Amino acid sequence: MTLNLFNLLTSYLSIYFFASFLIHNIKEINAPGGYNFLVLFLVSLFVVFISGNLFKYLKKINYSFLFLALFITYFILITFITSFDISFLKQVTIGTTGGVLFGLICGIGCSLIIAKIYEISIKNRMLRNSSLVLYFIFLLITLANTFYAFETNLQNVRSDIFLIRNQLGFYQRPGSFMFIIYMILSSIGAMQITISKKISFMSLFFGFLLMTILALILMMMSQLIGSNSGTVSIFGFLIINFIFIFIIIFNKDFLNRMKIINFSNLIFSNLGIKYFFYFPMIILTLLFLLSLLLDYLGINLESLRIVGFGSTFTSIINRLEMLENFPTHLNYSPIFGNMIVDKITTGEGSYIHSLLSIITHLGIIGSFIFILFLSTLYSNLRFSGTISNLQDHIYNNKIYLIYRILTVTTVIVYCLFSSFFTWLPLWFAFGFFGLNFIKQDEKNL
């Protein structure tokens, strides 16, 4: 029991250290730092690995990792060959702004920690309650730290528009970090719901209320620093949280009857079609609540960057204009791709802001490998059988599987329409939600 409590506390501390690193860089957007928290995250993660025996998950990784490793190898090779720039290679691999490996490793680490929290929490009621208390403490501390970061930057706001002074264009990194924080806290909340034999209405209401408040603060913070991506991605994830809670509360019988749960059975079932029609209603409700908040805070909608500061939706227009560069970039090296094709042809940064940028920058070969990776990823996001919801491994939990399918799909869809393929939250989500650390045959018990 003592070891379980130690591992539970260490697991939450590890997640807290990682969140502290992210929040520090949200607060100090022009002065990246907080790497002491990142070191503490890695050290505590190592402690959990040893004392919690997380190596057992790494021994059971499935074949989707093969295509992932192949894609990353090709990505690194093409980046080096086409740029011959070590600093650029570091930036897109282990850099904390858009590093594919950095995002993936952090996502995998957080996924394994949550797997350990789940594994301990289901042992008995005392550990389950302890886990829930630690989650609410973590949520409240993160909420307080995030509000403090927002309040600090709010003191530096311009008088004409809702944007901080001396905004040097360093908004993408903190915008991504805000989204990642919300991913983590939402995921732990969803995990707590799956391990509760009977969901307390007050716990569910209080938790979701705090998560909604956190989302609103992060969205306002995103606008304050000029990140439309942070605002829209967090808003989309808030909608997914709404849908997930409605699904598990009002559709328990339908879920219990489902023998196979995967992407197609979930999205294209009667359940998925029903919530597809509810989707606009949820969006309008949340937008209405957001407008009330803006009115309460005395913030004019036209002072926000997402509406082009009252002129036009410049962010969307700029992205549409960049679509004209797609044929030029693709024709430069259609087979192998070129990671600096935009710099060579139409100007640095003029690439399309879409996941489809894989085609222009990694060519047909890289795109084919990536599609193979995605197909294996979704084939492993699957539940089959009649076993109960609660299993020894979180990767077997069919309710949490539904959450993982919804979330990883949401991140992919958002990236498809708005971000370059090295977008940090995408690769964090692949490691956090997408990858399974158990063999396929163990899922079909």
Image (spheres, helix red, strand yellow):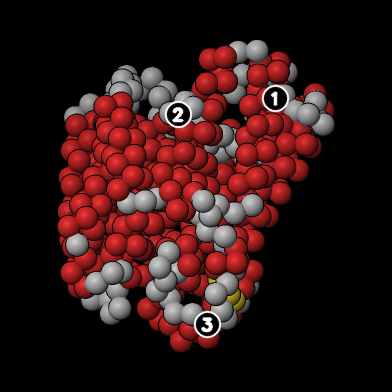
Quarter residue 168 falls in: top left
Q: What SS does tag 2 mark? A: loop
Which image quarter holds the C terminus? bottom right
- Nearer the observer, 425 or 329: 425
- Nearer the observer, 422 or 18: 18
Q: Residue at x 71, y 49 (%)?
A: 372
Kind of residue sitting beneath label 1: Ile
Q: What SS does tag 1 mark? A: helix
Residue tagged 1: 78
Q: Disc 3 to disc 1, how far (Cα)?
A: 46 Å
Label 1 crowd bin: few (<14), some (14–19), many (20+), radius 10 Å: many
Q: Earlier in the sequence, mark 3 or mark 2?
A: 2
What percent of the width, then of the height, locates residue 281?
45, 68
Q: Work out whether 97 lies above or below 283.
A: above
Label 2 crowd bin: few (<14), some (14–19), many (20+), radius 10 Å: many
Q: Marks 2 and 3: in contact by CB < 8 Å?
A: no
Residue tagged 2: 97
Q: Which mark is residue 386?
A: 3
Kind of residue sitting beneath label 3: Thr
Q: Work out whether 122 lies above or below 65.
A: below
Q: Earlier in the sequence, mark 2 or mark 1?
A: 1
Q: Please indicate whether residue 11 sits to the left or right of residue 313 in the image.
A: left
Quarter residue 383 falls in: bottom right
What percent of the width, then of the height, locates residue 41?
30, 37
Q: Residue at x 21, y 65 (%)?
A: 127
Question: In the image, which is nearer the foreground, mark 2 or mark 1?
Answer: 1
Q: Marks 1 and 2: in contact by CB < 8 Å?
A: no
Q: Which mark is residue 360?
A: none
Label 3 crowd bin: few (<14), some (14–19), many (20+), radius 10 Å: few
Q: Disc 2 to disc 1, how far (Cα)?
A: 20 Å
Q: Disc 3 to disc 2, how far (Cα)?
A: 43 Å
